Image (cartoon, coloured by chain):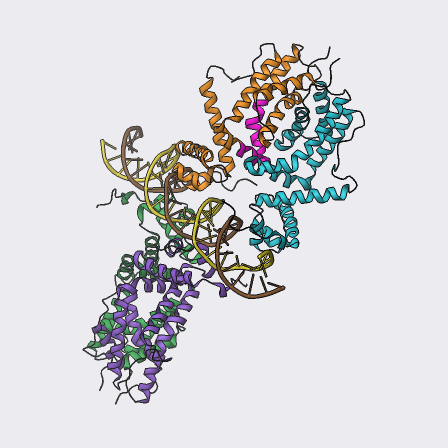
Chain colours: A orange, B cyan, C purple, D green, E brown, F yellow
Amino acid sequence: MAPHKAPDSSRRSDRSRRAIYDAALALVGESGYRRTTIEGIAARAGVGKQTIYRWWPSKAAVLMEAFLDLAARAAEEAGPQAGGAEYGIPDTGDLAADLKLVLRATVDELNDPLMEAPTRALTAEGIVDAKLGAEFVEKLLDPQLALYVTRLRAAQKAGQLRPDADPRVALELLIAPLTHRWLLRTLPLTHAYADTIVDYALGGLTPRP
Amino acid sequence: MAPHKAPDSSRRSDRSRRAIYDAALALVGESGYRRTTIEGIAARAGVGKQTIYRWWPSKAAVLMEAFLDLAARAAEEAGPQAGGAEYGIPDTGDLAADLKLVLRATVDELNDPLMEAPTRALTAEGIVDAKLGAEFVEKLLDPQLALYVTRLRAAQKAGQLRPDADPRVALELLIAPLTHRWLLRTLPLTHAYADTIVDYALGGLTPRP
Amino acid sequence: MAPHKAPDSSRRSDRSRRAIYDAALALVGESGYRRTTIEGIAARAGVGKQTIYRWWPSKAAVLMEAFLDLAARAAEEAGPQAGGAEYGIPDTGDLAADLKLVLRATVDELNDPLMEAPTRALTAEGIVDAKLGAEFVEKLLDPQLALYVTRLRAAQKAGQLRPDADPRVALELLIAPLTHRWLLRTLPLTHAYADTIVDYALGGLTPRP
Amino acid sequence: MAPHKAPDSSRRSDRSRRAIYDAALALVGESGYRRTTIEGIAARAGVGKQTIYRWWPSKAAVLMEAFLDLAARAAEEAGPQAGGAEYGIPDTGDLAADLKLVLRATVDELNDPLMEAPTRALTAEGIVDAKLGAEFVEKLLDPQLALYVTRLRAAQKAGQLRPDADPRVALELLIAPLTHRWLLRTLPLTHAYADTIVDYALGGLTPRP
DNA sequence: GGATAATCGAGACGGTACGTCACGTCTTAGT
DNA sequence: ACTAAGACGTGACGTACCGTCTCGATTATCC
């Protein structure tokens, strides 16, 4: 059950690790995930193939870590002042406005052509590979969703959200439609759509008396 | 620009086509999409490789057609009486109940282990390959979603749905959360969840006065 | 026990086979056997690696066949007139002279720099790999040695060789010393040495009365 | 041109050196020379790879030294009384009998399964690698052959060998046929064959008047 | 006897070649 | 003409070793 031989991570080459991240992200961006190969990543990074196989079980795992590293570096750069909070959802007192702000930002992020290829690749891989999917959810998705839970709980305290509503489900009502359109490319994903989703989700679909 | 040589589809072997469908579905179910190969499908179907390459552009296309064929055969079997409508969403007058019924069925379908692997494979492939994704949406997803539009329009006429609500968006509010949980495996996908989604979506998240 | 799958040799590409022979001999001549790789042969021959692996079990086997082919072509070119006899050992009636002629030719052949590398490689490989060695002996060595047996038998009939001498052993007494010097590079292999061996072997080492 | 850094051999670990010898010989015996790797030797000897690379230029060199060491230890054990002469060829006055005795012993040694694999490996390597071959001849082969020269010179003095016979050539006439059969595996190598070779070589092949 | 410098075990590293797998094209018989 | 079969050139796979390198942790002389 234990891995046949665990390499000594204290002797790992940081230079190679970073070069692999960079090469992986660049190649996926340039040629797409399918056409990106481990051999290609190794060659571009100036690294032996074995150095990749030593530390990662699959191409998808490499890309995942590269992604996490990218996110971590971006976060570190963006807000070194905010200790652990990183970037939360703002709370101006107006729940609908705050959610629209954040969901519009999400729309922009999803539509960013630079991020699109690697994100789609990683998501698709996670859909098929349960282990990778779990890691994707745990390390990338859940932390983001937790911010919504926090904001929605605050809204409940402020009386802007039904006290009996499960914030987790509420959040999915808001997020899932955007994800749906983006992943399946059914219809364009716009700011207007984000606003509509907030309005419909908060207000409900049935007529109010 | 035109394909170099269009094969004469009138001479096509039906026997081979069906064998390929069966082999493709069986192999994807047994070994997963990644490990399923065109050579493997050809061997299992007792067919030459060229017979596959002649009629389909890719492994994904084969699987897609196999899926459509499966769906068509299932439909034919289920309701030969209903002309083109296949099976619509029931209309008992109680919108919430009708939606819960259908969404629960959807939950069951998604949780069916037989369908899971091929559906995930096809969806994931469509997420990465835009062309295939479009086909997937057009041939498999949109027809299903149209049924919701029909039912929701009827509800609007009956005054059970806001007249200003866009049925297409409304439907996404209902469907997307299920898809989200299923695709990303964030949390279990249950009947209870389907019910909750219907309640939240119809009723809205903010307190009613 | 049977090979997992025997390829259909009737459909084998002659063009590829010849290109592989040429590439193998050229590379071994240029870079030596150790530095010659299957990948290199395939690349130089403009052939897929699998085409080599399909038809030969090892690098040594490729070289062996290339060698046999070379010998066959040389033989065909040299003497298409002589039906099956190819080139035998001449019989002028003077056994010593005939043997010296042939052994001097052997010395020249062994000292030919073009043949040296591949012959050494093949011999060395056969020394270590019994299976290959058997093939080497059967297909390359034994046919040559048989010519000596014929000539020595003729000498026996002519009363130039002891009637009780085993031609096979006699032949080894003549050939082995040359092979020994060539393989082990103990001392230079010259025409004079060949002559000496013939004289010593025929006349014996002990004083004649 | 000079080696970049000569290691200080006075600080060399004897324990490691011996462990490497043992491991090398054992592995070659067990798996053959080709499948024996430097990494494997290091692992089996409980030694760092660099310790091998520091002291030997190649796998063949390791095996050669291991062999020499083995021979030295065997000699030390066999005859600690005989100073430098080790074990010479006996001189009973009967040249033929003495040679048969020694050549039979050689036959036994060559047929010893324990020695076979490493000896073949070393010989084959020397056939291809001229540098190693020279070392093999100088350190292992020539000392043995010198014993024959000594014995044959004594025979000449005693009038049992032609005075004009070159002892070096004579020796090759005796040794080479055995080596030939052993290396090329053409025919079985037996005591009877050794006897025949001595008889043929001493007596010559042509009829005595 | 304590400093100091080389060797030691270990193993990560950039590479090369291995032998295998599947790709998509092409050729050959057979129906 | 389309089929089953499968050889072909191509290229990536994941593995095994190569020979170099960098680590502490022993040694083992020299001060």
Percent x, y of residue C130: 42, 65
Q: Main secondary structure of the magenta part?
A: helix
Q: Is residue A82 left or right of residue B202?
A: left
Q: Residue at position x 53%, y 34% from top? A: A121
Q: Quadrant of the C terminus of chain D?
A: bottom left
Depth check, front residue: A35 or B157: B157
Q: Which image quadrant is residue D83 in?
A: bottom left
What is the tally of numbered marks visible in this picture? 0
Magenta highlight on residue A137: yes
Question: Can residue B78 be seen?
Answer: yes
Question: Can residue A12 be seen?
Answer: no
Report the residue that reaches farthest toward the right: B92
D55 is higher (above) or lower (below) than B109: below
Percent x, y of residue C46: 39, 55
Q: Residue at position x 54%, y 32% from top? A: A120
| Residue range of the region highlighted in magenta in the rendering | A120-145
Depth check, front residue: D125 or D143: D125
Report the residue that reaches farthest toward the left: D164
Q: Is residue D161 left or right of residue A151?
A: left
Magenta highlight on residue D14: no
Q: Is residue A203 left or right of residue A194?
A: right
B120 is higher (above) or lower (below) than E24: above
Q: Which image quadrant is residue B123 in?
A: top right
Q: Residue at position x 47%, y 17% from top? A: A79
Percent x, y of residue F25: 39, 34
Report the residue that reaches farthest toward the front: B2
Percent x, y of residue C88: 32, 79
